[in-house]
Image (cartoon, rainbow, N blue to C red):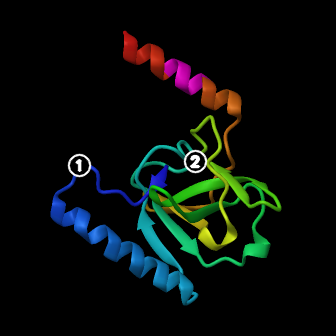
């Protein structure tokens, strides 16, 4: 998942994450967009480790399938793509994941990824890869690691 994580960093750096998250949430609540560096590979190849995401506040009624949103998940703030909007809530999945995430309630969604920076180039969020491509990538990775 794309999330704000400090795995493998110093305890001092890990202690700053809650402050960063609360500051970012406060800015989005005030209608101010934020920018942060993504970690993780759950949105690969659409969003890659280390790319900067630009997140803007969002009206829940404007959310559509295909949007990449930032939400409060059980692991922390997570950027994943909406795969279904329903009465029970919103279902997301990372582009590099085979299974959907647990249902999100609209109040857990804090923003929409407006664009990202790849290198120093600003680009729109790419569309999701096909499920077949995701599965093929996992099979290839399995065989490469086992050799």
The residue beneath circle 2 is 46
Residue 89 picture quarter: bottom right
Residue 85 picture quarter: bottom right
Q: In which quarter of the image is the C terminus?
A: top left
Task: Check contact, mark 2 vs mark 1: CB within 8 A.
Answer: no
Using a 10 Å C-alpha cutoff, classify the residue at mark 2 as few (fewer than 14 neighbours), some (14 to 19) or many (20 or more). Answer: some
Please, which residue is most extreme toward the right here?
87
Q: Is residue 137 magenta?
A: yes
Of 76 and 53, the residue lying toward us = 76
Principal secondary structure, stretch drawn in magenta: helix
Can residue 111 be seen here? no
The residue beneath circle 1 is 8
Can residue 22 be seen here? yes
Q: Does the magenta stretch include residue 147?
A: no
The percent position of residue 63, horizontal first and vertical second, equals 75, 67
In percent of the image, x 47 and y 22: which residue is there?
A: 141
């Amino acid at each position: 998942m794309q999330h704000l994580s400090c795995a493998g960093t110093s305890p001092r750096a890990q202690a700053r994450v809650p402050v960063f998250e609360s500051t970012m949430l406060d800015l989005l609540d005030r209608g101010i967009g934020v920018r942060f560096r993504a970690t993780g590979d759950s949105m690969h190849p659409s969003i890659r480790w280390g790319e900067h995401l630009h997140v803007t506040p969002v009206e829940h009624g404007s959310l559509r399938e295909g949007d990449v949103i930032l939400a409060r998940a059980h692991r922390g703030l997570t950027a994943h793509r909406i795969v279904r909007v329903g009465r029970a809530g919103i279902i997301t999945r990372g582009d590099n994941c085979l299974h959907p995430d647990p249902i999100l309630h609209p109040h857990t969604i804090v923003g929409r990824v407006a664009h990202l920076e790849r290198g120093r180039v600003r680009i729109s969020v790419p569309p999701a890869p096909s499920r077949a491509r995701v599965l093929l990538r996992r099979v290839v990775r399995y065989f490469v690691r086992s050799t």
